[in-house]
Amino acid sequence: MTAPKNEAPPLEAAALDALRAQAVEEIGGCSDLSALGELQRKYLGKQGVLAGWLARLPSLPPEQRPVLGQGVNRLKKELTELIAGRESALERAALESAMGGPFDASLPPAPQERGSLHPLTQVTREIEDLFVSMGYQVADGPEIETDWHNFEALNIPPDHPARDSQDTFYIRGPGRLVMRTHTSPVQVRALERLKPPLRAIAPGKVFRNEATDASHEHTFHQLEGLVVDKGVSVAHLISSMKTLLRGIFRRELEIRLRPGFFPFVEPGFELDARCPFCSTGCSVCKQSRWIELLPCGLVHPNVLRASGVDPDEWSGFAFGLGLSRLVMLRFGITDVRLLLSGDLRFLEQF
Ligand code: DAH
């Protein structure tokens, strides 16, 4: 019986079947990537077994070629897919063993916690931008300060009663060092270093020996401001403070000045602003409709003198914004101790 047309002679077809069975078994049992590479070269490479089969085709009788050619090509495709599948299975197994567990590259990544700026940082940056736009520079000073800068140069001599309200932590050792009780010493440092005319603000941490409660903390933040130039007056002070308040609360707030005593300014004021949160009285303004925000005044001649600046030639104003308090007002925070608590439940809200 002759083979029907288009069918490979049984001998050749059987050999191809045997080859297929052997290749499938070898590939399926292959357990490492370099051996798999060998198998790929062996069967599918340029000098490989299947290439050999194709090379032999022209020598076969013409009626056998198509069937056998198709069979070889089918096998080539099948082995290519088999090897690719085996390869990715081996790669995955290697990755999983390196990662210590099953791994699915198509899964979405684990959500990443994103941090945010601390409310104090947010407000500080906002106010810095505002003042820089008005030609101020941002000055800095040490948190451990000399008694001279923190007190004496600010017209607070050793036995002055103003020291009582600013009890702080004293540093043991040589030199009379204190944790600064306010940002006002940066006024002195700025005057010493920069000389007038100058405009500067100085945000930063300050320290007091306080019994802590919801409105008192041993560490809090202030922002000092200082302008020294020729002919600076209370009018300049008031207009600058109005600009500051407009920048902070984003609208015009009525203000009032009350006399306030601070040894480093004369005259000194407590500047109050209309409560931005109510029109009839609320808990923030304690029903008074005013909030006390900005102690300020004209720089005392003794302060200028202490920094080597002639008070007959120069005058200036200064203010001390309670940054912590402002941040509390802005965000409705009711306990100052939260600000530096590092408590994530608090911080995540900003
Ligand atoms: N340094 C003062 C304090 O901590 C605040 C202050 C008051 C600063 C009046 C000033 C000022 O610059 O003019 O209590």
Image (spheres, rainbow, N blue to C red):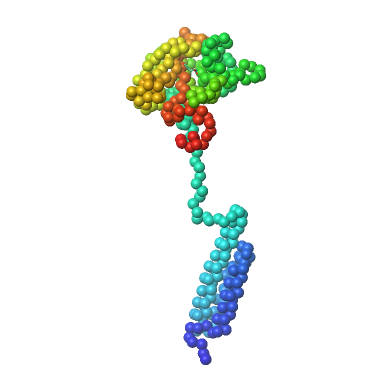
62 and 20: which is toward the camera:
20
Q: Between 204 and 325, which is closer to the camera in this rendering? A: 325
The residue at 45%/17% (across/down) is 295
Residue furthest out toward the left: 279
Can you see residue 227?
no
Instruction: Note whether residue 7 is visible.
Output: yes
Residue 189, x across and y down, in percent: 54, 18
Name the spot of residue 233 as percent of width and height, x first: 41, 13
**Vertical order, 228 against 104 (above or below):** above
Residue 170 rendering spot, x and y as whole percentages: 61, 19
Is 300 rendered above or below residue 56?
Answer: above
**Residue at image x 36%, y 23%?**
281
Residue at the extreme top = 312
Query: Which residue is at 59% across, 55% downward?
Result: 101
Residue furthest right in the image: 173
Res. 266 image quadrant: top left
Q: Judge from the rendering whether residue 241 lies leftward or rightward of residue 52; answer left or right.
A: left
Task: Name the foreground residue: 84 vs 96.
Answer: 96
* Depth check, front residue: 88 or 346: 346
Question: Does residue 254 appear to the left or right of 35 in the view shown?
Answer: left
Q: How many tags in the picture?
A: 0
At horizontal 56% and vertical 17% (from top left) the residue drawn is 167
